[in-house]
Amino acid sequence: MESNTSEIAHEFVPFFRVYKDGKVERITGTKLIPPCIDPQTGVESKDTVFSPENNLSARLFIPKPTNRDKKLPVLIYIHGGAFCIESPFSTLYHNHLTTLVNKANVVAVSIQYRRAPEHPLPAAYDDAWAAIQWVASHAKGDGPEPWLNQYADLDRAFIAGDSAGANIAHNMAVKAGVSGLVGVKLVALVMVHPYFMKGEPDSLIKFIFPSNQGSEDPRINPASCDAGRLELSKLGCSRVLVFVAGNDWLRDRGLSYYEALKGSGYSGVVDLVETEGEEHVFHLFNPEGEKVEPMLQQFVSFIHQV
């Protein structure tokens, strides 16, 4: 008997539904925008494949031509969306990276990763590391992407992300510290409203990360398990900036991460910025809000401290 595509097998609102025939329907985060030259800022973007085997691309951003007269810091950005929605090509992230590149005067590499539930975690972690390795392949100026060869200073690399992307960014900084990263000098990690667990994983994580190790998995619970706290001390960068929002349901988890990192023996500098009265990733959903500009200026100032 054929399955009925209208029958829902699993549902995680507002993210996705899985139907009994295997079809996945994403509920939000599906609006896309092509690369372009932004008419307001002059920031230029384009897409380039970094993983042909998994059909993954990065969206690259460079500042307006008058700001490209010297090598620029590199911002490797990992989008959020609970590991299962959004992409570098979605309107939210395209617009956000355009703004960041214009304000910070950096080259940005906004990376795509395979999303759950079709590709359960740890696929996203593997893809993010592959993207970083791809960026590193341009260290001698002869990599496959001309923009990185011409404009990117890989001795001044930042990795950043929001929500689930901040989780992935943290794990990439851990991997860089533990395994080493040749070709890129990772100077700092920026985490915006990071998505971590406290205690046992929730139902979404259990579904999209079936191989997780529960409350003792350092990838999702770095502040509250022994392995996670040990990894914090080994982050492969010298500075960390953590953003939290006062009305965010993840606020306490971001604060726990900040406190755990400070107490871990990590030798670098750790900063915390809290935006009171705001919700999770408010800067993406309301980019014209009065508290967005101060937040972005703190982000930019952190980059310019190098």
Image: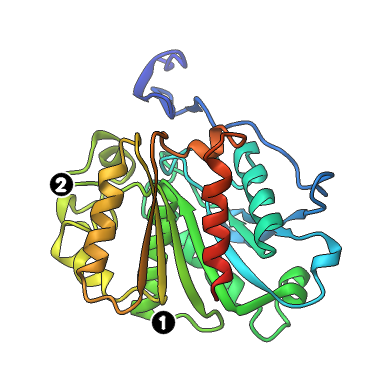
Q: CA distance from mark 2 to mark 1?
A: 29 Å
Question: Could you tell me which residue is drawn at 76 percent across and 60 percent down?
Answer: 63
Reading the image, the residue beneath label 2 is 199
- Left/right placement of residue 279 relative to residue 296 reads left
Q: Position of residue 74 (x, y in %)?
A: 62, 69
Reading the image, the residue beneath label 1 is 180
Residue 110 picture quarter:
bottom right
As drawn, 264 above or below 125 = below
- Mark 2 element type: loop
Residue 261 picture quarter:
bottom left
Is label 2 or label 1 in front? 2
Q: Residue furthest bottom?
A: 140
Q: Position of residue 157 (x, y in %)?
A: 56, 73
- Bin the neighbour count of mark 2 within 10 Å (Cα to Cα): few under 14, some 14-19, many 20 and up: some
- Left/right placement of residue 232 relative to residue 36 reads left
Give whichever of 38, 215 is nearer the camera: 38
| Residue type, mark 1 in image | Gly
Question: Could you tell me which residue is drawn at 56 percent across and 51 percent down?
Answer: 296
Contact, mark 2 vs mark 1 (Cβ under 8 Å): no
Question: Could you tell me which residue is drawn at 63 percent across and 39 percent down?
Answer: 90
Is residue 59 in sight in this rendering?
Answer: no
Is residue 303 in sight in this rendering?
Answer: yes
**What coloring was used for the rendering?**
rainbow
Q: Position of residue 149 (x, y in %)?
A: 74, 77
As drawn, 306 above or below 60 = below
- Bin the neighbour count of mark 1 within 10 Å (Cα to Cα): few under 14, some 14-19, many 20 and up: few
Give whichever of 259, 145 is nearer the camera: 259
Residue 12 picture quarter:
top left
- Mark 1 element type: loop
